[in-house]
């Protein structure tokens, strides 16, 4: 028996990287999983994994209304939302363009706010001991500063505290909300970082040497398994928590 049998789950940004890894583990554990993404290639990913696919722009409220309406009308309810979709940016604060800052906030923070807002509304209609679980993807960069991380770090720090507010407001009605703080996980979000240097393999080795565990994380094994745990009733007493999954990256000073 799968640990997520009978659960209806949305994973945003599921066309790639962590979202695809989380969706893979959800399907393996028996959840009826709906991948959403702005990238239509998510359709093929969903097909390969045995999930459903809906096109969605997480930064647009109308897109959230449409997505949740469709999921509830087709599948009956929403049990789990993973707010995973996100974009990366890196530039010193004095060189960060307002449009870049705004775009990062729109996707990484407003997108998570809208997801929480509309998921809570849908989950309030559920009955039973556990009404829903929301899992928000923050980052280790949401816990501490990072060079070049003005927009990205601020958005991820916002996700951390938004999570705690949603958790507090809904704890008594059994809707839980937790954040995951990945370290460095091997996904296409890192592509621009490697593309910007002459020797990407050397940069990869340098990064891995700095990680206490000695290697980068894997989307399905490391973040997917944490998301499964937070989505199941195994974590019924955990809400408003920061789950750091970083191979020891934040243990001490670099
Ligand atoms: N990979 C890492 O090392 C790492 C570390 C910490 C946190 N994270 C966070 O994990 C999440 C997933 O990152 P990833 O590494 O898998 O990145 P990724 O680039 O591989 O995947 C992100 C997905 O989000 C989708 N997306 C972007 N904008 C969207 C929008 N407006 N609406 C809907 N979908 C949209 C993209 O199309 C893509 O499929 C992000 O929130 C990221 O900030 C990643």
Image (cartoon, helix red, strand yellow):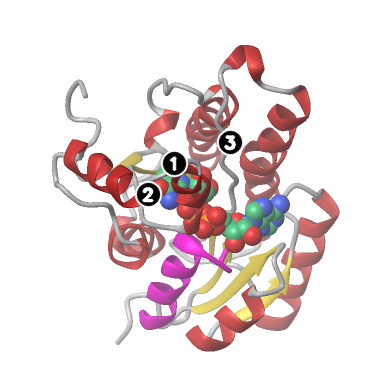
Is 216 situated left or right of 60 in this image?
left
Q: Is mark 3 within 8 Å of ligand 1?
A: no
Mark toward the start of the polypeptide (3 vs 1)? 3
In front of the other: 143 or 119: 143
Residue at the image point whose x is 28% and y is 46% from the top: 202
Give x and y (percent) for residue 112: 62, 44
Q: Is the Cβ of the residue at disc 2 closer than 8 Å to that at disc 1?
A: yes
Residue 67 lies, with reference to residue 120, above or below; the image says below
Asked whether 17 or 177 is in front, the reply is: 17
- Mark 3–mark 1 CB contact (< 8 Å): no
Answer with mark 2 or mark 3, whichever residue precedes in sequence: 3
Task: Give the crowd class for mark 1: few <14, some 14-19, many >=20 residues within 10 Å.
Answer: few
SS for dot 3:
loop
Residue at image position (28%, 66%) is 221
Quarter of the figure that contains the N terminus: bottom left
**Residue at disc 2, secondary structure:** helix
What residue is pinned by disc 1? Answer: 197
Chain part drawn in magenta:
13-29
Cα–Cα span, label 2 and label 1: 6 Å
Disc 2 target residue = 200
Residue 135 horizontal/vertical position (percent):
47, 52
The answer to whether residue 48 is seen in the rendering is yes
At horizontal 58% and vertical 48% (from top left) the residue drawn is: 86
In the displayed image of the protein, which residue is found farthest to the top? 94
Please give the label number shown on residue 183.
none
The answer for how far apart the CA atoms under marks 2 and 3 are is 18 Å
Name, please, the residue furthest toward the left: 213
Task: Report the residue at 70% width, 46% height from top.
Answer: 114
Magenta-drawn stretch, dominant element (helix, strand or loop): helix
Q: Are marks 2 and 3 in contact (CB under 8 Å)?
A: no
Q: What mark, if any, has residue 89 been given in the picture?
A: 3
């Amino acid at each position: 028996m799968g640990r997520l049998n009978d659960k209806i789950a949305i994973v945003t940004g599921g066309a790639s990287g962590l979202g695809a890894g989380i969706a893979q583990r959800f399907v393996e554990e028996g959840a009826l999983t709906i991948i959403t993404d702005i990238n239509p290639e998510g359709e093929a990913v969903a097909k390969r994994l045995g999930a459903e696919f809906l096109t969605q722009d997480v930064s647009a409220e109308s897109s959230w209304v449409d997505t949740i309406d469709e999921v509830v009308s087709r599948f009956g309810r929403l049990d789990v939302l993973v707010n995973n979709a996100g974009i990366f940016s890196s530039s010193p604060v004095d060189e960060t363009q307002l449009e870049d800052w705004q775009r990062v906030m729109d996707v990484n923070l407003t997108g998570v706010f809208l997801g929480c807002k509309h998921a809570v509304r849908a989950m309030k209609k559920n009955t039973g001991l556990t009404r829903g679980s929301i899992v928000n993807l923050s980052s280790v960069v949401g816990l501490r500063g990072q060079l070049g991380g003005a927009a990205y770090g601020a958005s991820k720090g916002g996700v951390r505290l938004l999570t705690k507010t949603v958790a507090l407001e809904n704890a008594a009605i059994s809707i839980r909300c937790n954040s995951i703080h990945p370290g460095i996980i091997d996904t296409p979000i890192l592509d621009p970082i490697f593309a910007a240097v002459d020797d990407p393999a050397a940069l990869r080795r340098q990064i891995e040497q700095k990680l206490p565990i000695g290697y980068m994380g894997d989307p399905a094994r490391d973040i997917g398994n944490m998301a499964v745990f937070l989505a199941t009733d195994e974590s019924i007493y955990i809400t408003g928590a920061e789950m750091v999954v970083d191979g020891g990256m934040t243990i001490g000073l670099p």
